[in-house]
Image (cartoon, coloured by chain):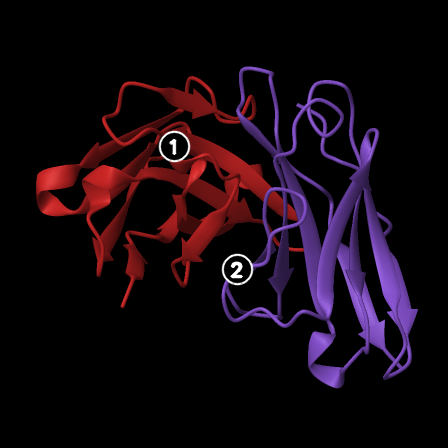
Amino acid sequence: QSALTQPASVSGSPGQSITISCTGTTSDIESYNYVSWYQQHPGKAPKLMIYDVTNRPSGVPDRFSGSKSGNTASLTISGLQAEDEADYYCSSYTSSNTHCVFGGGTKLTVL
Amino acid sequence: EVQLVESGGGLVQPGGSLRLSCAASGFTLSYYSMTWVRHGPGKGLEWVSYISSSSTTIYYADSVKGRFTISRDNAKNSLHLQMNSLRDEDTAVYYCARDRIEYGDHALDYWGQGTLVTVSS
């Protein structure tokens, strides 16, 4: 199955906002409100940041928000902080026989 | 406190086999689907396999179909991944994760710390 498409890297200065895009197809993002986002620091397990496009788990700062338009989902981080520097992955349910697909990941650098 | 602890990783030759386990605690395993995800060196996360709470629904990534088998023992609070015919490209850290899809959410809300599988001669 094909991975969802994410930019390889994004960067921003502390206090700024950034947006990471995640492009899929009619088999996944476009047809379902089942998009999640994960943060992964080096050597650590991924952490759920957003689920079902817009929902934030308890404990995740409201600086993190998600949205979707057509076949593209987005993760926005406002008020960037140094600890936000990490890899971010999107994921979607897919109607293919494989159930779930991840994006290739985006490295966020806080300048 | 929800905890997932993977074990069983190690060094194996191409064509060999390994069985990964994931011990669950702090929640009732039989209420949740479970998923395996791997992270290869220099690569992104890759979804590997899914099993529903009652084991009635199972999915595999195309890259492992026919070689890997997912299973669970709810009575023993454990999840397993039997990996056969291993290839170099299966080298990765393997994570088990709790999956909330049966509750209507696309969310892997708890993850283990991962276990490293290295396939090399």
Query: Residue B42's spot in the image, x, y percent?
Result: 69, 55
Identify the chain drawn in purple. A
Q: Residues within 10 Å of mark 2 (few under 14, many from 20)?
A: few
Q: Colour of chain B?
A: red
Amino acid on which disc 2 is placed: Pro
For residue A65, which quarter of the picture?
bottom right
Residue A14 position (above or below residue A39): below
Q: Is residue A48 left or right of residue A26?
A: left
**Residue under numbered circle 1:** B102
Please report, as a chain letter, where disc 2 is located: A
Residue B88 position (above or below residue B39): above
Q: Residues within 10 Å of mark 1 (few under 14, many from 20)?
A: few
- Could you tell me which residue is drawn at 70 percent across and 58 percent down? A88
| Foreground of the two, A13 or B68 | A13
**Residue under numbered circle 2:** A57
Element on which disc 1 rests: helix
